[in-house]
Amino acid sequence: YYRSLETLISEYFVEAGRNWNFNTDELNFYFVLGMNLEDFMDKILNLTKEEV
């Protein structure tokens, strides 16, 4: 589980301010894409569930 990475990304989002040029559908797409890439990244990094 990438808790420290998620925290860092959240901090970057907060620091980015409010002037985003994304609509709701685009933001939802990137959010879901990131959630679904967790298993893919585990395979890329050769991590097991115990290591994560």
Image (cartoon, rainbow, N blue to C red):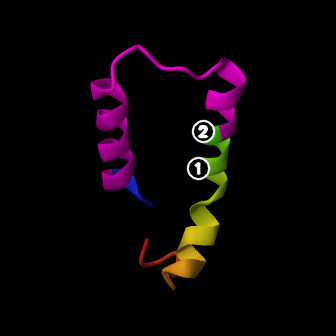
Q: Residue at x 66, y 42 (%)?
A: 32
Q: Position of residue 17 (x, y in %)?
A: 33, 18
Marks 2 and 1 in Cβ contact (< 8 Å): yes
Residue 34: which disc?
Answer: 1
15 shown above or below 4: above
Furthest toward the top, the residue is 18
Q: Residue at x 36, y 36 (%)?
A: 10
As drawn, is 23 to the left or to the right of 19? right
Query: Which residues, given as a range, are shown in magenta?
Result: 4-29
The amino acid sitting under disc 1 is Gly
Q: Position of residue 7 (x, y in %)?
A: 32, 43
Rendered-image quadrant of the C terminus: bottom left
Specify the quadrant of the image occupied by residue 25.
top right
Label 1: few (<14), some (14–19) or many (≥20) C-alpha neighbours in 10 Å: few
Q: Which residue is mark 2?
A: 31
Disc 1 secondary structure class: helix
Label 2: few (<14), some (14–19) or many (≥20) C-alpha neighbours in 10 Å: few
Furthest toward the front, the residue is 21
Please say whether residue 10 is one of the residues in the magenta stretch: yes
Q: Which secondary structure dominates the residues rendered in magenta?
A: helix
1 shown above or below 49: above
The amino acid sitting under disc 2 is Phe
As drawn, is 29 to the left or to the right of 8? right
Q: Residue at x 45, y 61 (%)?
A: 1
